[in-house]
Image (cartoon, rainbow, N blue to C red):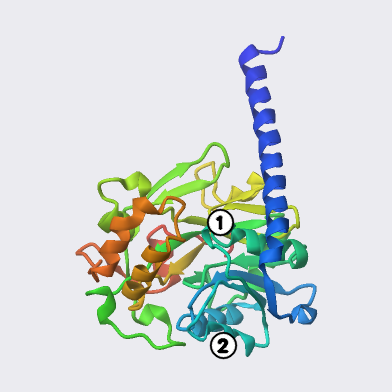
Amino acid sequence: MVNPLEKTGRLGKMTMAYRLRWKRRRLLLRAWRKRRQLSMVCDRTDRISPDDILCFSTVRNEALRLPYFLDHHRRLGVGHFFIVDNGSDDGTVAYLKDQPDVSLWQTSDSYRLSRFGVDWLTWLQMRHAHGHWCLTLDADEIFIYPFHETRSLAALTEWLDDRQTASLGALMLDMYPKGPLGASDYQAGQNPTEVLQWFDSGNYSIIRQPRLENLWIQGGPRARAFFADEPRRAPTMGKVPLVKWNRRFAYVSSTHSILPRRLNHVYDENGGEKLCGVLLHTKFLPIITKKSAEEKQRGEHFANSDLYQAYYDGLINNPDLWCASSSRYRGWRHLEALGLMSRGLWL
């Protein structure tokens, strides 16, 4: 005889799987409709090889960050970049047009109403990414992983392919300087960690979300400095940036979660550790005070931007995020020792 509770549990799982399958289809349809918002600037997709690793990003006024962003990920082994520019006026478009491994689109439509750029990138991934390993990153995210200085992304993705693993998770690690955020100096092309040398190493909470089965990670200097009274409203720091793409896949919330939800299983449920990376988050370069004033006025970066008014005001006031428990960045092995990154079985 079938246990009634077990039967109810199976029915609930089947119902959830059905709902998520339709949600994924709606997201793909939404991206297909949003394709009309994109205007081609330069199309170099004919240069892509079948085994190229691709990188997708939506940017706005990132001329300062892009030289290092592109060079770093080229060194890792990215073969082609798909970039959507959302109304830049700082020379970003001219710079990207000169990059031989960049295909570029423009749009002046709402970043927030495109699910923060995800709809635009999903359409490009549907058209161009099927069968490729893909990084989906913001321009202020620098992807690193164990042995990244000596082992290419191709070596990493080959290892993942051998284990029939189609996704890799990463902690987004907020990097910051010692002293007021706007007091340091940064030049285009410079390694941001020469300026942003500090991070929080131990104030993170992790919850497994039952619906999408992804990890919800919160903490770091933003939670500590701006959301201490309401920690549940702090930004989430867990992401799934590296995926072996299929045209039926769709990110749900930035790269924090993805469908099918098996791709969110980037953690070990049996007490061990899975290979994972880190996104060095370079949000707190000296331009942050100016950008925060602009983004507060635009109201394009959060679904409920009213909740983040005090957050923006705090950044505009040029705070010092350093504290006595801050840790100085010394490379990926240091992050692994602190439990923020793992090589898993990749030795």
Which residue position is annotated with label 1? Answer: 113
Give the total of numbered labels.
Answer: 2
Give how far across and how far down residue 149 sits, in percent: 53, 78
- The residue depicted at 41 percent of the width and 57 percent of the height is 339
Q: Is residue 219 visible from the viewing direction of this image? A: no
Residue type, mark 2 in image: Tyr
Tell me if 13 is positioned left or right of 189 in this view. right
Which of the 4 image quarters holds residue 2? Answer: top right
Q: Which residue is mark 2?
A: 95
Q: Amino acid at mark 1?
A: Leu
Q: Please tell me how crowded label 1 is: few (under 14), some (14-19), or many (20+) other residues with Cα within 10 Å.
A: some
Disc 1 to disc 2, C-alpha distance: 26 Å
The correct choice, above or below, for 146 with respect to 189 in the image is above
Decide which of 239, 274 is in the foreground and name it. 239
**Helix, strand or loop at mark 1:** helix
- Return the x and y of residue 85 as percentages of the image width and height: 58, 74
Residue extending farthest left: 324
Q: Foreground residue, 150 or 48?
A: 48
272 over 119 or under it: above or below: above
- Tell me what residue is drawn at x 70 percent, y 63 percent: 35
Across and down, in percent, residue 334 comes to: 39, 68
Residue 301 in the figure: left or right of residue 151: left
Q: Nearer the viewer, residue 22 or 153?
A: 22
- Give the quadrant of the N terminus: top right
Quadrant of the frame with the C terminus: bottom right
Of labels 1 and 2, earlier in sequence is 2
Q: Secondary structure at mark 2?
A: helix
Of marks 1 and 2, the one in the foreground = 1
Q: Residues within 10 Å of mark 2 (few under 14, many from 20)?
A: few
